[in-house]
Amino acid sequence: MQFFDRAKIYVKAGAGGNGSAHFRREKFAPKGGPDGGDGGRGGSVYLETDAGMNTLVDYHYRPHHTATAGKPGGAQQMHGAKGQDLYLKVPAGTVVRDEETGELVADLTEPGQVVMVARGGRGGLGNVHFKTSTNQAPREAQLGEPGEEATLLLELKLIADVGLVGYPNAGKSTLLSVVTAATPRIADYPFTTLIPNLGVVVIGDPTRGDDFSFVLADIPGLIEGAAQGVGLGHEFLRHVERTRLLLHLIDGGSYGKDPWEEFEAINRELAEYSADLAERPQIVVLTKMDLPDAQERWEIVHKRAEEAGMTALAISSATHDGTQELMNLTAERLRELRQEDAERKIAEEALAPASGPVLRPEPEDAFTIVPEADGYRVRGKRVERMAAMTNPDSEEGMERLEKQLRKMGVLDALEQSGVEPGDVIHFGKMEMIWGEEMW
């Protein structure tokens, strides 16, 4: 399966079913009253994280997704059936943004998380709801409300405890294959790893219940200029943002180069991409100690690491020398970091105010009027819904809409904005021509 960590999808919730304008017609009641039922609500679209997924490839080839519409109402006040909700599976670690606004919709980090990304439209009311003492036979029935639509940008950031960083060919894939059951592609040339690979490291004996496990990520190698997107830079850096600890691998077989300069070059790229990422704890690891002259490089690395107050280890993945010691040290450090995170969370909760901020959401009746080239656009949750659910071919429905708009102050606001006969008034996808007869 191909690995895709970005995708653009188009989601559309189902429209609500239309209300019925039916009248009761029976043998002994030829002129029965209205008995039209309501339409069913349209299906909504949800994103749900799936522990078995690790790529967005499905959405690369199939970007359009639509939930089913609600069914129309029927006679004898029968309600239409609801539309079926649509659940789209995504990997844990998926960040969801609205393409139009750039707004963060959701950050899905745990398996089983669910978020609604498009709400289904309400079903239209049947004519039975519009019966009054002065109108015993209303022919008005509402249209179903259109379902919400959105264009979403999905971006996958791997969920891993420990990330392997370093130049291409530093031995990250080989180490992953040795300490986990992962089987990454391995060869002696740069950029062997073109996609992230994950493996689970288990320390201890699971049968005795004293085991400790963590997820280790081997991610495409960095080169200078990665923070500006050179090479596989951005593809790499995005995937280490969630890690708690970094194992910084230095190539022990890269002769003629200053190993510590390679180490500092990678850290400069991390800092340029994210100051927070540069502060992430690191363990320095010199690889390929089975090769000639690697010991000389180790002396340089070990000395400079001590001067910098950092822990350094030398390993050979080919002979497995030092790999278990490295994993034990990683597990120990990871335990400490998890404990620190837990204590920090408890402290933050203790310092948090007893009650959260007072939220004052915008009233549903609120609206704004925006001039456009051919007239004006009226924006507002309730006003757009009313317009969308009114049948423009229904005289009763249009009269009712006019009364509602006047009551809300929309018509007065349009007049104050300078509307003139012939101007087009936009309510969502509905358009009306301003004129004396219309209003």
Image (tube, helix red, strand yellow):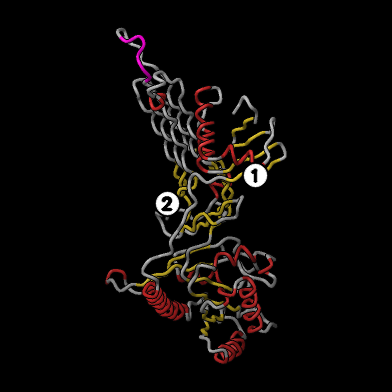
Q: Amino acid at mark 2?
A: Val
Residue 13 image point, x, y percent:
49, 39
Residue 346 placement: quadrant: bottom left
Q: Is residue 80 visible?
A: yes
Residue 406 image point, x, y percent:
54, 35
Side (left or right) of 391 relative to 82: right
Q: Residue at x 45, y 48 (%)?
A: 116
Side (left or right) of 362 relative to 75: right
Query: What range of the chain is rendered magenta?
Result: 29-34
Helix, strand or loop at disc 1?
A: strand
Is 313 magenta? The answer is no
User: Residue 370 has which mark?
Assistant: 1
Check the image and report above or below for 26 versus 343. Answer: above
Which residue occupies the extreme right position in the image? 373
Residue 36 image point, x, y percent:
39, 22
User: Residue 209 has which mark?
Assistant: none
Which residue occupies the extreme left position in the image? 208
User: Circle 2 sits on which residue?
Assistant: 114
Which residue occupies the extreme top position in the image? 27
| Tag 2 near tag 1, CB within 8 Å | no
Give the mark nearer the N terminus: 2 vs 1. Answer: 2
Per the model, the C-alpha gap separating discs 2 and 1 is: 35 Å
